Image (cartoon, rainbow, N blue to C red):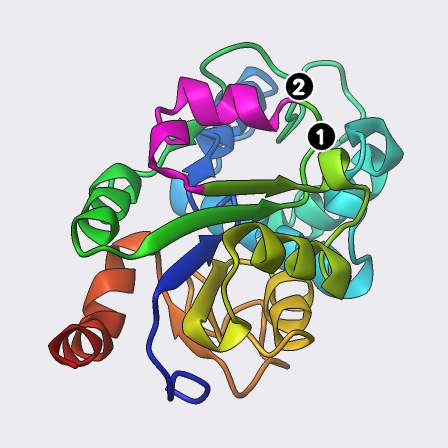
Amino acid sequence: MKGLDKQVNYIWFDLGYTLVYVNREERYQKKLKELGVDVSLEKLTLAFHLADKYFMREHPGLLGKKWEMYATAYHQVLHTYLELDIDFRSKALIEPDDPNRPKGHWKAFEATIPTLQMLKKQGIGVGLISNWNETARNVLKETEILSYLDHIVISSEVGYEKPDERIFKIALDQANISANNCLYVGDNFYDDVIGSRKVGMPSILINPFGKKGIEEVSNVQIISNIKELLPSIEPRLQKDKAK
């Protein structure tokens, strides 16, 4: 993989839809059924994915803001992908995502903890660089991720957001490590890949649908989910360990 030409000692992760997720598709499917609209989970999952990628590309940073700032626009885009002609402002339609929801809203992906455990077992440093509000540490505690992180850098705490290179420099300073010896893993090309590249840090992009929604993106390794991370970098880590 381009950029991974030096030893990888540390892996930084994004949080939302990299390590954790919300079960928005099933919730939304249930609410649509209450309105007499039947949409498959497969179609909903793809529509949410495409809506997310649209906003990442066209409105960088907006998805990290308060829901009310973009709720109407998000529903418009979501329903376009769903090919639905219903009132998306209906009170019967719950929000597709909200970082301020109660405990248990966010869940760790099935492979998140095992992946972090394996990295720690191999002596690889593990950190977080996330655009998130003041609820981030609660999410990390509730999903049992917190204990596996050596360093945590959250935009609401440091005053800078990805892709600003300063948030990456703060993380590197905290870990006292060179960007060349790190890898960044995230799901947003415009925040995660472009941001990490500004400090010379190679990256891997998570995209569950291959190139769907990010057809314009090139020159980056893509995996479907965190479960594929270790197999994709294991040869590199084994080679490093042997040195």
Considering the whole magenta stretch, tell me its main secondary structure. helix
Helix, strand or loop under label 1: loop
Identify which residue is drawn at 65% across, 20% down.
Answer: 94
Helix, strand or loop under label 2: loop
Tell me the quadrant of the picture where the C terminus can be found: bottom left
Q: Which mark is residue 133?
A: 1
- Give residue 152's position: percent from left, percent from top: 54, 40
Q: Which mark is residue 211?
A: none
Disc 2 crowd, CA 10 A, few/some/many (<14, 14-19, 20+): some
Q: Quadrant of residue 87?
A: top right
Identify which residue is drawn at 11% across, 78% down.
Answer: 242
Looking at the picture, which amino acid does disc 1 mark? Asn
Residues at marks 1 and 2, CA–CA distance in whole angstroms? 9 Å
- The residue to which callout 2 is attached is 100
Work out whether residue 142 or residue 178 is closer to the camera in this orientation and state it: 178
Closer to the camera: disc 1 or disc 2?
Answer: 1
Query: In the figure, is residue 67 to the left or right of 33?
Result: right
Identify which residue is drawn at 67% across, 61% down.
Answer: 169
Looking at the picture, which amino acid does disc 2 mark? Asn
Q: Is residue 101 depicted above or below 236 in this figure?
A: above
Task: Please give the range of residues in magenta.
Answer: 135-150
Q: Cβ–Cβ below 8 Å for labels 1 and 2?
A: yes
Q: Is residue 205 magenta?
A: no
